[in-house]
Structure formats: structure tokens, C-alpha cells
Image (cartoon, coloured by chain):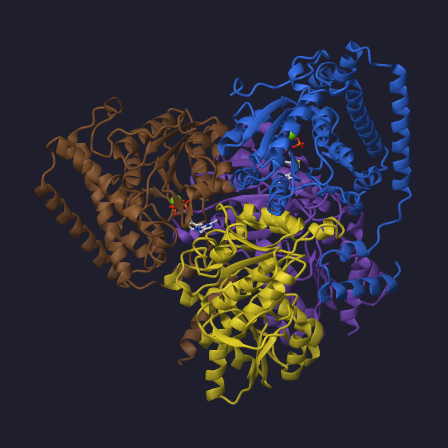
Chain colours: A yellow, B purple, C brown, D blue
Amino acid sequence: MTTTAINTKKMTMIQGVRDAMHEMLKEHDDVMILGEDVGVNGGVFRATEGLYEEFGEDRVIDTPISESGIIGNSIGLAVNGFRPIAEMQFLGFIYPAFNQLMTHATRLRQRSMGRFTVPLVVRAPYGAGVRAPEIHSDSVEALFTQMPGIKVVVPSNAYDAKGLLIASIDDPDPVLFLEPMRCYRSSRTEVPDGKYNVEIGKASVLKEGDDISVFTWGAMVIDTMKAVEKLEAKKNVSCEVIDLRTLYPLDKETIAASVQKTGRAAIIHEAPATGGVSNDVISLINDTSFLYLRAPIQRVAGFDTPVPVYSLEQEYLPSTEKIQTAILHAVDF
Amino acid sequence: MTTTAINTKKMTMIQGVRDAMHEMLKEHDDVMILGEDVGVNGGVFRATEGLYEEFGEDRVIDTPISESGIIGNSIGLAVNGFRPIAEMQFLGFIYPAFNQLMTHATRLRQRSMGRFTVPLVVRAPYGAGVRAPEIHSDSVEALFTQMPGIKVVVPSNAYDAKGLLIASIDDPDPVLFLEPMRCYRSSRTEVPDGKYNVEIGKASVLKEGDDISVFTWGAMVIDTMKAVEKLEAKKNVSCEVIDLRTLYPLDKETIAASVQKTGRAAIIHEAPATGGVSNDVISLINDTSFLYLRAPIQRVAGFDTPVPVYSLEQEYLPSTEKIQTAILHAVDF
Amino acid sequence: MLEQFPMHQIINEEGEIVDSSSMGDITTDEIKSFYYKMLRARMLDKKCVHLQRQGRIGTYVPYEGQEAAQIGSSLALQEGDWMFPTYRDHAATLTFGHSMRNLLLNWRGRPEGNVAPEGVNIFPPGIPIASQLLHATGAAWAEKKRGSDRISLVYFGDGATSEGDFHEALNFGSVFNTPTVFFNQNNGYAISVPMKRQMKTKTIAQKGLAYDIECLRIDGNDVLSVYFATQSAVDRARDGKGPTLIEAVTWRYGAHTTADDPSKYRDQKETEARRETTDPLLRIERYLKTQEAWEEEWLTRIEEEITLEIETALTEMESYPEPDLSQLFDYVYDTPTWTIQEQVNNHLAVQGRTTQ
Amino acid sequence: MLEQFPMHQIINEEGEIVDSSSMGDITTDEIKSFYYKMLRARMLDKKCVHLQRQGRIGTYVPYEGQEAAQIGSSLALQEGDWMFPTYRDHAATLTFGHSMRNLLLNWRGRPEGNVAPEGVNIFPPGIPIASQLLHATGAAWAEKKRGSDRISLVYFGDGATSEGDFHEALNFGSVFNTPTVFFNQNNGYAISVPMKRQMKTKTIAQKGLAYDIECLRIDGNDVLSVYFATQSAVDRARDGKGPTLIEAVTWRYGAHTTADDPSKYRDQKETEARRETTDPLLRIERYLKTQEAWEEEWLTRIEEEITLEIETALTEMESYPEPDLSQLFDYVYDTPTWTIQEQVNNHLAVQGRTTQ
Ligand SMILES: Cc1ncc(C[n+]2csc(CCOP(=O)(O)OP(=O)(O)O)c2C)c(N)n1
Ligand SMILES: Cc1ncc(C[n+]2csc(CCOP(=O)(O)OP(=O)(O)O)c2C)c(N)n1
Ligand SMILES: [Mg+2]
Ligand SMILES: [Mg+2]
């Protein structure tokens, strides 16, 4: 983390996201925003509020409903001198753009031996728990962590959101910037004015502990912290909680060091268990820390089902009970 | 496995694939094939050779180049009484259909509480090693194993291909049927005439052994068997080799039983290591067999890079050397 | 292209017949029944907006202003035909036979919302824009292959025409000559984005020219024009003459959804003015008045009838059994995979085990 | 629509000028230089087919028959403009400045094949059908935003018009008025699928009507018609008048790729007949003969010149250094991630360790 600014303001995560874009639009002529309803309307979550008015329709652009079009054009713009920030209205609507991301945005550097590069940021609200309609709540980060050529970033608070988004816009390669909707207004954190970075690829230790390393990200940070608090209040167990923040590339050092200290691990995420990023974390621990492990690694994850309609989404989401049970399971093993 | 047939013929895997479709088209009026160049041309790999001539243009249909269109229409056809077999010319061209698969084909049963179902088979040649152009060689099975509502099947020989494809066509839910191009003509196996099933979800123990369980699928079966043969010839090590055949749902019993017997595991696949199905296997072993493990689980996988142009693909693909090294690493740990 | 695709009307804004030749032999009673259906839909819509404000249902998608487009078109279908709605087309699905209770359940996030009564072929609403058009061509193609005379009708908005799936569906429909009616409701906006930023063309109808399919543009607020245009498209489809693209020009009065504030992107005065000018119900009222077929008493009676129907459905909805966990697991596959089965078991075990 | 979109010609199959008004003041020498470029492309193509048979290169994608379409259009571009080719457009890329050696390397599966000389703006060929159209609108949009007068030209086939990306690109181009030439080579087939199964329309040009953009249909085997049509589309784009869709009607003589057998899906006699009728080179030869500007001696000289150029490139290609492992890793990210770095290290360690 590098901070050059001094003044801070308390803000919500969505304000942190907006602040980052505001800062970068102001500082860099090549930065631009495009997406559905990001202009006049200021975004369906208000992430781009006021930016159209301040920077004009050439820099904050309402596009047709055309996700493949948005990413495809962003590639052309990025290769030809711009740094587009493309908004997918919800992560569940990124699928029509899958081909453009998979075969072009992420491969153009390799395909052209470095001649063409794609400094593109794709922003997308995601995750369950806000009573959104079907498809809107998908947690499909693992579709992208396995996609060579892109980085995947997930802040859980305003400070990280602003710093990570600035870092993502400055990154010379495509970055998928996931915004857990449940975090948008769930808390306020102090956020410095001006430009600062939170380094991509670095996890954040939210709480130190000795008995188990609990890895999570996005909105599950909220529930994990709650669960750990409850558990520590009633049992003699000390948990280390780590917000991974970047899902590709994972922060190998931090993960390995923590597990080597505690000897146990649990991973919490809301995407389905099968194919979830938890499995990459498990592999990493297997590779780095096999001899340190005192219990099987615990996963608390969504089910191998689609995210259901919202009357069932609280059943779908990992509960604090399940998190506690998993931690105890490892500790009592 | 249920076999009702008696006569057998030696055939290549591509012939097994064709034979399954031939059988099912003949037996069932609701089975149909659609895709690019599957009709008059008989498929770019000849998988549908002669079927257009035999069953006519209403059942073996050349479509426009429109993958989303093919899957989207197949959904409508499947819901309304047909059992379409949709061919994606190469797995690397499935991406434009991603939205239709992710938000419809796989969810319609849940979304409609069982009212609408999608008995659809999506066939796709895949994998590197046949000197195909860019994008054609992608191994992205893990995009689909994490997609709730679909099953993922990968035969490596003619017998399995025919039996699994028949089972897939008979399955009431969507099945992604992956055809490793390198296996199409690499060997011949005895294949019964007529209809038989190879059960989805069951792995196949290709070779028993005591010291390590080696899991693989698709074209890497070839290299794994080669590597194991070489290794056993020079070292005192006994390897169990398991062809997973179905990647979702994994065959938990077979995997766990093998690892509990050998105490060691290696997983070989050509998709990138990060996000690969290997990580699901590792999780399964972690969940079921933690106390049996005598060494870290070994992965031999593709790199976290796109599959390169073909002059480099042999470097990209896991070599028999790497497989041997990994096995020894576990055994000598 | 505006000249090539004039907006066809049968009854104009003043309630006057401007094209009597296209009216067939429709009776005043039938027109009154169209009015009834539109009123029913409007009253349900207003009720839902209200219920949402009271917190009795979640985010709601209103269609007020689009009743003629949805009802005129759905009335042209017959039992056994297929309907592919979007999230905004519950006036159409209701009219085609969906259950009002289930529609209300939908706005409580209940899966039953997607399930129409047995025998009523309505797909779960398409959420990813334009994706449902391909199911409509596929399902219609299946009918054609079977040699039946059933057809499919699919709804989609002006914004939906920008998606690739719109194009692929029209091309499939055209190439395989599927019996499909592509029914576009051009309500002028895609959330906040006006038609002129969605496309350069002034009409949506002209997009049919790219596929050599029948295409036309009608006043989507004139329920008669909608009904007869759809009927002839349906007839053509049944006769094996292939798909039709209908652009029904309309307007939504309300917000995109109850979570949105339309004054941020358009002048709501225009919308309010439209209630007096282009309104689909008012126009029929005016027409009926010119025919001396309008009775306030009748209106009162049907309003009461509809109110009762809505209240009954609401009560049923509110007293509907709580959602069951099995709904989350049971319909992912025909037979649950072991992964899902194991997850259910763990879930139930934890629920039983820790009590907070 | 065939009447609305006649196939424009300047020089007909017999080599006669049929529309002198569209020829500007082009000189015979210039026409001879067009011929030269076409001959160069044809000779390279024939050589490549031959090299493939000999096993000296891998699967190859021939374009014989399409030289006028590719060369007439690429000659209308200027330095700094952007070209977005498919896998079949190396006659165009060669003409626009790609290196012949690198083009040959491409057919050996070498990444250098995707890299044109510095300053020559050619994208790696689009492999997923139609996906490159969106890059062409995006790159052109960037030029427009910067206020330059550079434009983009994108190639795609008849089959490509079925993909959603085709539609989304034409819509973006139309809405944002990007300086883009959508250059369609309608060679009648998409692998084995004839145009009439790909679409119901008889023309591709008419698809432009769906976007209110300029659209036209030309004889893609008439290099002059191609050149002038493209030039005016390019001029319109430079002048801020937006995109144009050009349908160039042509034919591929050979297989889809050297891995395919065209006799399975079309009568190759028709193709052979076309060598005598619609051939783009023969037509110019006939024209030059009518102008008494054809000299066998000139032909022999340029054939020798081109043969030498090809042999030189071939030698360079065949003596090019072996591929380096770094090409696999170095260009995935600007800075390799630790995952990739670790994988390289393991890879090198194993290579060093076991020798088999
Ligand atoms: C693929 C996809 N992208 C974005 C969205 C978000 N979204 C929901 S409704 C809507 C606007 C649709 O406009 P239109 O097609 O005109 O229909 P209307 O809402 O006006 O009825 C958008 C962008 C979505 N549902 N699906
Ligand atoms: C998305 C996608 N689907 C399928 C293919 C396989 N494929 C390669 S070329 C081709 C035919 C393309 O036809 P057309 O656009 O007419 O171009 P032509 O080859 O005739 O030049 C197909 C289907 C592909 N490359 N990309
Ligand atoms: Mg609309
Ligand atoms: Mg073609």
C-alpha cells in the first residue's frame, strides 16, 4: 500500500468505488467509462453518479444493451490508447461477453507477442443477499480466476475498493473488479482523498489468531467476522481472519504463512463448493503447507445449485452457524 | 455398465461417437443433431458422417454459425419434446453460447420447479496436441464442472465414448460431452453393437497399483499410461491409474477408496493448474481421506497461460517426464 | 424508414376509428372484454406498486401504459401456443392464463412465480435480455417438426434489439421458417437509455429487413391494432409462412422497476401528459363513448369484480406456505447428485446442531 | 432486395468497362500494379498449398479466387489505418504491409505470424467468427475520440453474419458513428454450408438496413469495383459520415482449409468453370489486353520477381530460430504472476532433471 494523500473521509464502499473513478477520470484523459445506464442515470447502484455531468458524454458513455459489444469495443479502445472501465450491470450479465473476455481481452498480449495490450477494467456488482431477481446474484468469480490473462479483485470495504480500483485502472492488463452488493452500503471506512493504491495480489489480515486461518472475501467477510466474534466469545479458540481481496493471483505468502502458523484452515465463500476458488486455496495449502496441517481444510460454501430466487437465498448463503461449526470441526479434529 | 449387445467391432473413438448417435437416431424419433457442418459435410472430424444421408435434413441439421443460436434453439426444442445433440465445432467456440448454457439450459428445471426440462447433449472436440489453430485447443472443462445443472463427461476410448454418449442422450438433464481430439484416432477398442450404457459418474480403474493413485482423463490418459509404464519399468513403484471419465459429478467412492489404499495421489490434466478440476479432486481427497495421505497431492497440469500456438503446444502439454517426476516426488516424499 | 413503416392504428387517440377495414367483424362486446382485461391488468399493476411501497412484496416491475400491447397480443394466441415473456410481461401472462396468485408470489421471490397452471405454456420470464427469443424459435421449430399448428410468441423490449441473441433468433426463425411472432414492445426506454442511444434507426420494424421476414410497426397503445396485427402474424405462422416481427410503439408510465427513479433520465411531465393522450384504456373508453356503449355502472361493477379477484389472490399469496428448502435442491437435476445430497445433509445437520 | 442491391461492376467478366464513371482517373499502370498485387497473392497462396502438401507447413487456409476482394479493399487504406483480418485474409494483410516471412511462420504455428511490422496496424486474425468486428468499431471509435482521421476496416465472411457479434458491431458502429468499413467477403460458403442455409436473404448488403448505415453490394471479383467502393467508404468514414457495409460477392476456389474436402459439399466443376469466367486476375488480363497493355514478357518478369520474393521469405521462414519457451510465458501479463513464474521454474527443473 502506498498512500500519498492525507485527508480522509468516511464513506461506503460504493462511494469508494465512485471516488476511484472520479479521481482517475480527473487525472487521466485516457480513462473512460462505458456501460448500460452508467451515464445520465449514474448507474443502477449510483456508482457513477455525477460523473456524466462532470466529464461529459464522451467519457462516461451509455451504451446499447450489448455486453459482448461493450467488451469488444473496450478491447478496440484499449488497444488504441484508452483505458476503459466497462461496467457489467450485474456479474450475472457478463456471460454474453464471455467470448470477448476469454478469447480476446485476456489473450491479445500473448497472441500479439506484446504488441497489443488491453488495459481494461471490468466492474461488476455481484453476490446474493440483496433480494435481487434471478441471475442477478451469481457468484462466478471462479470462471475468471481460471482464465489466463486476467486478474480478479474483490474488495469488501471502501478503503480497499478505492485503492484496488485505482490499482486496477493503472494495471496494464485486464482486471475483473467484483463489487459485492451486500458490502455497498453495509459499513463506512475512512478513505483518503486523492490517489492511492492497494496492491493487487495482496491479502489483508483482518484479525490475527493462533488456532485456525479463516480465508474469505467479498460479502462473506461480514458473516465470517460475525461468526468468529461469536465463536471466540463462547469458546477458547483464536481465529486468524484473512480477506483475500485478490482471487487471482492469490497471495501465496500470506496464505502459507498463516496456515503454517495455525495448522488449520477454513475457507468461506458463497459460490458453489465445486469449482469454487476455495479449491485453489486448498491446492495452494497442499503445495506449501502439507506437513503443517493438523486437520482437514474446511470449506463453507454455497451449494452446487444455482443461486435460488430470493425467498431462499438466506438458506443458500453460508450462515454464521455453518462457519462456526466448520471452524470448530477443524479445531476439535 | 449394462450391456445387452453381443457382437463387437474394433473401432476408433470417433467411430464410437458416431455409432452412439447412429444408434440413438435409429431408435428414437425425438433424437436429433444440430450444429455447424454436421449435415452434408458429416462434421469436420467426421463424427456425423453419413447420418444426414441416412436420417435426412430434418434430423441432422446444418445450422448458421451461431453458437448461442444453436444452444438457445436446442433449449426450445428440448423443452418441447426433442432430444437435441448440439455440436460445438470445437470447445473453444462454445463461449458465445455461454449465456444460454449458464442461465437457461442448466437452470430451467430449477427455475420452473421441474415443469420444463432440458435433455440436451452438447458435444465438443477439445484439447491440445493436434496442431490446431489458436482457440481450437482450449481445455476448459472446469468452466462447466462449476456450472450447477449440467454434467460433464470425457471419454478417452471408443468403448467409453459410445456408452457414455448413449447414457448422455438418455440423461434427462444437460450433459456436456467432451471429445479429446487426440483420442479420436489414437487407438481402437472393441465396441459392442447396439445400445449399451457406461454410467455417468463412474470412473474407470485402468490399472491397479499400491503406491500412488494417479487420476486423469481425456487425452492425458495416453500420456499418463505411458509415463507409468516407463516409470514402473525402471523404479520399484506400483501405480494405480484411474480415468475419471465423468468430471461432474466426480466418482467419490472410487477416488476415496483408491487414495485410502495408496496414501498418495497425483492428478494429471492439460487445463491450467489454477481453477483446474484437479483442485476439486484435491478437495474431495481432503474431505474424505485426510488422515490417509502420506505426501502432498501432486498436480501435473497445463500452465496458467492460454494454450499457445501449436509450435509451442508440446511444451504446454504435461510431458511424460513431468508425470514421472510428480509421481516420484510423492512416493519419495 | 419512417415512411416505409408508418405506425398502424385502428382506433386513434381520440377514440375514433381510422381504419375500419382492419377490424374484421369484432363486436362492441368483444371490445368491452378487451377493456376488461386491460383494466384488470392495470388494477393489478397499481396494486403491486402499492404493495411494494408497503413492503408486502419486493422490487416490482410495472407495466402501466403497456396494457394494450401485452393484452392485444396475448389474446391472439390459442391454448397450446407458447409464450415467452420478459420480467415486465405479466399483463400478457395473466391474460394468457397464468395464475394471479403465482404472479404475486413471484414478487415475493418465490419460485412458484415462474410456474403457470398445467397446460398453459408460459416460460419463466427471460431475465438476461433477449435470451428468450431463441427459446421461442426453438419451441416453435419443435411444433413445426411435429407438424402441429401451434406457434410461439415472444416479448422483448426496444433495448433487447441490441443483443446478439435478438439477431441470432431472427436469423434462425427466418432460415428455418419457424412459426414465431417476435413481438417487440418499444416503450422508448431501456431503463434510463432512450431509443435514440440504443440504435440509430427510427424504427425497430425495419430490422426485419435484414432477415427477409414480415415486419410491421403498429400503435402499441391501440389494443385493436395490436390484436389484429398479432392475429394475422399468428395466422401466417400457423399457415407455415414463417415468423413476423411486430414493433408495437408504447410507453411505460412508471419506473423501470420500483427501485428506479425515472425523473433522473426523463421528464415525467411527458409521461403524465400521455395519460391524457395515448393511454390505451382511455382510448377505448372514448371509443365506447362514441358508440354509446360506455356505462359508468358497468365500470363500477367490473372494478369491484377485479378488486375482489385481486384481494383473493393477495390473500392466497400472503397465506401461502413458507418456502421449503427442498425447492433449493430438488430441481437442479432429475436425480440429485451426491454432491448436492451431501450438501443438504450437512446443511440440515448444522441447522439442527448449533443454536445460536 | 436483389433489385435494391445490384452487384456493382466496373470491369465485367469479359474485361470490358461497364461503368467508366466510377473509375476516377485511374491509370493503366495503376491497374497493372493491382494485377501485380493479385498475382503476388495468388502465387503465395499456391505455394502455401504446395508447402502444406509437402508437410513444410501445417494446415493452411487458402484464399485463391478472393484476391480482388482482399487486395482492392486493402489498397484503399492508408498508413495508420487499422485492419482486422480473419484467418483467410493474408492477401489483404500482405498487401497492407504484413511481412511475408511472418505470414509463413504463422502456418508453422509460430506466434510471429500474428505480428506485423512496427507501424502497420494489423490485428491478429480473428479466429472466433465475427468477434473481430467489435474490435474494429472500438479501435475506430478511439480514432474518432482523438479527432484523427484514421479509420478501421474489418473483414468477415458470409457465415460470420449469423453471429451475434456481427449485429452488435454494426449497431455500435451505427450508434457511435465510428469510422469503420465492414467489408464482407461473401464467398458463398461457410466451410460446407452454403449461403442459402446461413440466411434467408439473397444479399448481405441489405443487413445494413437494420442499422441505417450505408450499404452496398459489389462484384468482389472486380478489383476496380472493390477498390473504388472501399475508397468511398473509407472517405465517408474519414469525413465523419460513419460506417459502411460492403458486400463483395466472390468465391473461394479451394478447400475451406487444406484439411477439408470441398467435393463433399459442392460440385467442384462449378469452381473450375469459374476460373474461366469470374476470375479476378483473368478479368484484368482481359481488360489489359483490350487496352493493348498486356505483355507476356512483363508477366514473365513479374512472376520471376514474385517467385524470388517468395523463395526468399520461405528461406527466412525455414531458417528462423526455433520457438522459445519464453513465448509461452512472457506475454500473458505485463509482469508474470508468481503462479506462472513458479510453473516456468518447475518446468525448467524437470526438463533438466529427467532425460528420457
Ligand atoms: C443481458 C442483460 N444485460 C443487462 C440486463 C439489465 N437490464 C434489465 S432490464 C434492462 C433494460 C431492458 O430494456 P428493454 O429491452 O427496452 O425492455 P424494458 O425494460 O423497457 O421493458 C436492462 C439493461 C439484463 N437483464 N440482461
Ligand atoms: C465462433 C466460431 N464458431 C465456429 C468456428 C469454426 N469455423 C471456422 S471458419 C468457419 C466458417 C466461416 O465461414 P465464413 O464466415 O463464410 O468465412 P470463410 O471461411 O468462408 O472465409 C467456421 C464455422 C469458429 N472459428 N468460430
Ligand atoms: Mg424498453
Ligand atoms: Mg464464406
The one nearer the camera, A330 or C125, is: C125
The picture quadrant where one finds residue A320 is bottom left
Q: Horizontal and vertical percent for residue B47?
A: 65, 37
The outermost residue toward the left is C297
Query: Would residue D139 appear left or right of C33 to someone viewing this image?
Result: right
Q: Is residue B129 left or right of residue B58?
A: right
Which residue is painted at 60% across and 69% down in the image?
A195
Please name whichever residue, B40 or C349, is drawn nearer the observer in this view of the structure.
B40
Write down the quadrant of residue D316 in the picture: top right
Q: Quadrant of the C terminus of chain B?
A: bottom right
> x, y percentage for residue B263?
70, 72
Asked if residue C172 shows in the view, the reply is no
Residue ID at (48%, 83%): A229
Percent across and percent down for residue D116 are: 78, 43
Q: Is residue B14 above or below residue A4?
A: above
Residue C252 in sight: yes
Left or right for D178, reference A14: right
Compared to C49, does A153 lie above or below? below
Write down the quadrant of residue C183 in the picture.
top left
Note whether D300 is above or below B281 in the view shown: above
Residue depicted at x 78% and y 22%: D30
Q: How many marks?
A: 0
Q: Position of residue A309 (x, y in %)?
A: 40, 58
Name the residue nearer the viewer: A32 or C168: A32
Depth order, front residue of A57/B50: A57
| Residue at (82, 30) in percent of width and height | D44
